[in-house]
Amino acid sequence: MGLIDDAQIRERTQTTARRLFQGARSDSGFDLWKRFDKGLARNLSLFFTGVLYSRETISQKQRELCAVASLTVLHRPKELRLHLHAALNVGATRQEVAEVLFQQVTYGGMPVVVDALEVYAEVLRERGEPFPGEEPSEA
């Protein structure tokens, strides 16, 4: 039985995608893949979202913070945008996301971190959320 034939994987794919990417603009690589080959795009989505990203070995929050770190160092701003939304959607705080970005200066250098922070700033604006350093302090 292939992935497309598995109703449980199709349901997990839809549930996981809604949870992760709610509120994110839809200009993902998946949309481009669909234009070239809908069947292959569907199989990729079923595997990545319905199988890999729905695993419970680590939490969704941990998984998304890993994705944010990797995409920052690899300098993949389009994919980073989606996974910044996803990290916030699954419970990462704005401060945790910022800290993960800052940490990548060790592995990717200042230029990729600055670019990632610019993408993060756009995501926060899209979501109507304040920057971590601009929240009122509790006195």
Image (spheres, rainbow, N blue to C red):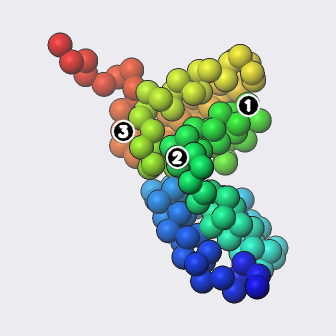
Q: Tell me which amino acid carries mark 1.
A: Val
Q: Earlier in the sequence, mark 3 or mark 1?
A: 1
Q: Is residue 46 left or right of residue 23?
A: right
Inter-mark Cα distance, 1 to 2: 22 Å
Q: Residue at x 60, y 57 (%)?
A: 55
User: Where residue 70 sits in the image (x, y, percent)?
Assistant: 70, 36
Q: Secondary structure at mark 2?
A: loop
Can residue 25 be seen here? The reply is no
- What residue sits right under mark 1 in the picture? 73
Q: Label 3, label 1: how many angstroms apart (C-alpha)? A: 24 Å
User: What amino acid is found at the position of numbered circle 2 in the picture?
Assistant: Ser
User: Residue 41 placed where, x, y %?
Assistant: 75, 72
Q: What number is the disc on residue 129?
A: 3
Q: CA distance from mark 2 to mark 3?
A: 23 Å
Left or right: 5 in relation to 60: right
Along the line of sight, which residue is nearer the eye, 33 or 42?
42
Tell me: residue 46, above or below residue 71.
below
Query: According to the image, label 2 marks what residue?
Result: 59
Where residue 23 sits: x, y (%)? 45, 56
Residue at 53% over, 23% down: 99
Q: Is residue 59 visible?
A: yes
